[in-house]
Amino acid sequence: MADPTVVLVPGMLCDAALWAPVEGALGLPVVHARIDAPSITGMAEQVLAAVDGPLLVAGLSLGAIVGFEVARLAPHRVAGFAALATNAAAPLPAQHQGWSRMARRTRAGDFAGVVEEVLPSMYSRPSEAAAREFRGMAERIGPRRFLDQLAAQGTRVDARGALGSVRVPSLVVGGVEDALCPPEFHRDIAARLPGCELELVAGAGHLLPLEVPEVIAGLLAGWVRRCAPPAAARGSAAN
């Protein structure tokens, strides 16, 4: 059987640079999914169209929410699932209100102001270098794609009930200091995923691959080995 492809799915206002510090540790072909459809289902279809054959889906925040939908739509395609810094529950009214407010400001020309408002919640202790990294990703996403991402957030549903059917090697990682997706979110997700490994990273916030890249690289590499052991190991196991 051919090795699966690792599909990395970014969070809102993020692009492939989110994964740059960790993707070299994965040991398999990597594809970066572009998510800009105005619904979670549409984004999941974008992920599924990014590669042929089996895939290992690793998503952060909105990217992991899309991953839940990928696993629901095409469980036969998913050979492994990693969810970082995310929430599987349905959005609260306050979240819908916040996304609507950000959309109004963005349409009114204040996209840069929205980015600056969001930035402090991305890191536990944002350095100037970290702030530049996030601003750069957000600028590359731009206001039009951001509006599509906000529209997609509005279509989210509670994904927790379907997690028990995701019967592939899974990894759930949260930052202990993540203000957006605290540890209890990740404990709840992990409790519903059969065969899941849960890691809560001390001193880390939301954008885990940028804030603690060595830790995340090691965790993802271990997850890939569980999902797709080296060919030699597969051959010896079959004998």
Image (cartoon, rainbow, N blue to C red):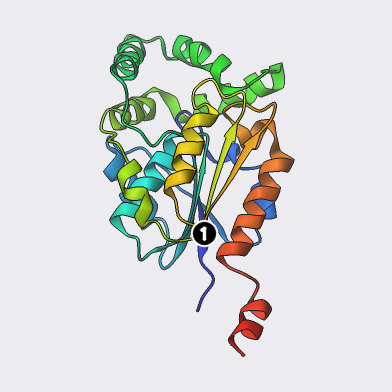
From the top left corner, tell me how far across and down residue 15 is, in percent.
51, 37
Residue extending farthest to the bottom is 239
- Residue 148 position by quadrant: top left
Q: Nearer the viewer, residue 33 or 188?
A: 188
- Residue 225 position by quadrant: bottom right
Within 10 Å of disc 1 (Cα), the crowding (few <14, some 14-19, many 20+) is many
From the top left corner, tell me how far across and down residue 124 is, in percent.
64, 20
Instruction: Establish if 158 lies above or below 139.
Output: below
Residue at image position (67%, 23%) is: 130
Instruction: Establish if 97 lies above or below 18.
Output: above
Instruction: Establish if 195 lies above or below 19.
Output: below
Q: Nearer the viewer, residue 156 or 193?
A: 193
The answer to whether residue 16 of the structure is visible from this angle is yes
Residue at image position (68%, 52%) is: 24
The answer to whether residue 46 of the structure is visible from this angle is no
Mark 1 lies on a secondary structure that is loop
Instruction: Establish if 13 lies above or below 67.
Output: above
Residue 128 relative to residue 183: left or right: right
Label 1, on which residue? 169
Task: State which quarter of the image contains the C terminus.
Answer: bottom right
Residue at image position (60%, 56%) is: 223
Residue 3 relative to residue 62: left or right: right
Residue at image position (41%, 68%) is: 53
Please name the amino acid that badge 1 sits on: Pro
